[in-house]
Each structure stands twice: as structure tokens, then as C-alpha cells.
Amino acid sequence: MTQYYYLVTGLPDVALDDGAAVIRSADFMEEMKSLVTAEDAILLSAMALPVDNRNLIALLDNPDAPFVPGGNFEREELQVQILRRDNVPDYMQAFLEAHRDGKSLFEGCSPADQLNWLFYDEMTEHPNGFIREWFTFERDLRNVIVGINHRRGLVHLQERGGDPARSLAALIIGRNEVAEMILRSGAPDFGLGAHLPWAEKLFAAARGNAADFEKAVDTLRFDMLDDLTVLAGFGVESILAAAIRIQLAERWGNLLEDAGRANMTAAVSKLKSGFTIPDEFTRTR
């Protein structure tokens, strides 16, 4: 395993409270890919796949949809791949083939959830331990929040097809142990308090307002990155974690720039985190 002594030593120290990243995430990814081995550059590319997923779904709905920078594919590349499907990851190819044939891979799931289901299935079986554990956490985090929202009948109508009573089974991605507990448990915390070390903090944060909740979720992400890299040293995992931290800090910096601190609570619903913030979280305590 390659050790990146100088790269890791020079990584920026990023915190959510900085208000803005010290470097654009797209620029950081491009620079790091040019400085690491070809094998590790592929690992870095995996960190940008969620952006590609979002762009792909947007382009399927509207070829002129706004395009989010920072992914592995440019707009024109994705538009070509929607038709050809010969130069995208396996999970994307499977999704696009099903979409072409008008098939639903997972009954009742939206196109975005079907794509992300395939994505998480692939990432949570990744040979790299950091990538595997990170995206397992991301999937579990997303599912717990969807479970909370659905239980309160507050699933976002626009994003979920307009039906607040839509089956929870159609909203939960994957069928690992956490997903099954959310689907079957009647406990207030779905029985996850003793299963996930971060569950208690998440449920406590869910009682706050939108901005506090969103900040708490991203703080959980930062904490998880610390846990996953405690033994990483100068390996590529430290660079992967830095890429995610910069993405998160950049997201908060953009929010503050667009809305201003006084309007954060109202504007926080614009954030795209892979889960939905229920309406009641937009009211301050």
C-alpha cells in the first residue's frame, strides 16, 4: 500500500464551522488524482459517484436540468451514456438498461432510489475497507432518517411521488440488518440504539430545528470519518476522508453564501443529503 507522507501531512484541516472549504472539492479531487497512483485515483473517483448519480437522474428527467460539478462525468458524457451505457460503472449500466426497458428493479422505488440502491449494493461490497464502511454508514444514516420521517407521516411529497402514506418498504434502500429493523420494529428508535453507536445522537437531533438537525447529521459524518481513519496514517484513506470533509464544508459554505446566516433555517431545505428533512424541523423550538 502506497504511503503519501507529504500529501497527507499537507491536507487542509477542514471543519464544518469554517463556513467554506479552503479549496473547491472538484479542484481537490482533480489535484489528488494527479498525485496518487492509478489504483488510488480510482478509489478517489468513487467519492464523486454520488454527484454523478444525482446528475444522471436529473438529466433523465430533463436534458437541460442544472448540472452539479464535481462528479466523474461531464454533462455531455452522461447524456451520451444514457444512450450507449458502455463507459459507466456496472450499477449505472444496470439501472440505465432497466430504465430503457421500462422496468422497475425494486418495486415501488423511485428512479433515484433504484439507482442509489444499486450504488450502495456495489459500494458496500467494495474491496477497499474505508469505502465499504463509509457507504455502509451513509446508507444506514439515510435509511434511519427516512424511517423517522415516514413514521411521522412527513415524507417529502415532491420527492416521494406525492403520497405521504407510501409504503416504507418502497423508501428504504437495501435489505441489511439496519433496514430490516426499521421495517419491522415498533420501538421509538427502531431498536437501533444498541446497534448503531450514533443512533442516539441522531434521534436527539431530530427533535431540533432544520438547521440544527442538518448540522448534527454532518457532524456525525465528520465523527465517522475520524473513526474510519484513526489507523489510516499516510495511506490513501486519509485522502479519501479529506475529500469528503471538503465536500461537506463546501456545501455549508455555499448555503451560507446563498442564504446568509439569518435565513439558514428557511434555506436549509435546499440541501441535498440523501434524505428528507420533515417540515416540522423547519420550526425553531
Image: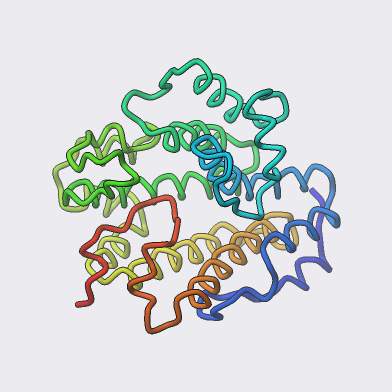
- Residue 70 pos. (x, y %): 66, 54
User: In the rendered view, does 146 fall on the left or right side of 137?
Assistant: left
Judging depth in this view, the residue of 122 and 235 nearest the camera is: 122
User: In the rendered view, does 147 fall on the left or right side of 16?
Assistant: left
Residue at the extreme top: 101
Q: Is residue 197 above or below residue 253?
A: above
- Residue 39 pos. (x, y %): 79, 42
Name the residue: 38% across, 70% down.
267
Judging depth in this view, the residue of 252 and 100 nearest the camera is: 100
- Residue 10 pos. (x, y %): 77, 73
User: In the rendered view, does 228 fall on the left or right side of 205?
Assistant: right
Name the residue: 26% across, 61% down.
203
Name the residue: 58% across, 49% down.
51
Name the residue: 65% across, 60% down.
243
Q: Is residue 99 above or below residue 257?
A: above
Q: Quadrant of the C terminus?
A: bottom left
- Residue 154 pos. (x, y %): 21, 51
Judging depth in this view, the residue of 35 and 23 nearest the camera is: 23
User: Which quadrant of the structure image shows residue 201?
Assistant: bottom left
User: In the rendered view, does 64 fall on the left or right side of 206?
Assistant: right
Coloring basis for residues: rainbow
Q: Is residue 55 above or below residue 236?
A: above
User: Which quadrant of the structure image shows residue 266?
Assistant: bottom left
Q: Is residue 282 above or below residue 260?
A: above
Residue at the extreme bottom: 262
Judging depth in this view, the residue of 197 and 132 nearest the camera is: 132
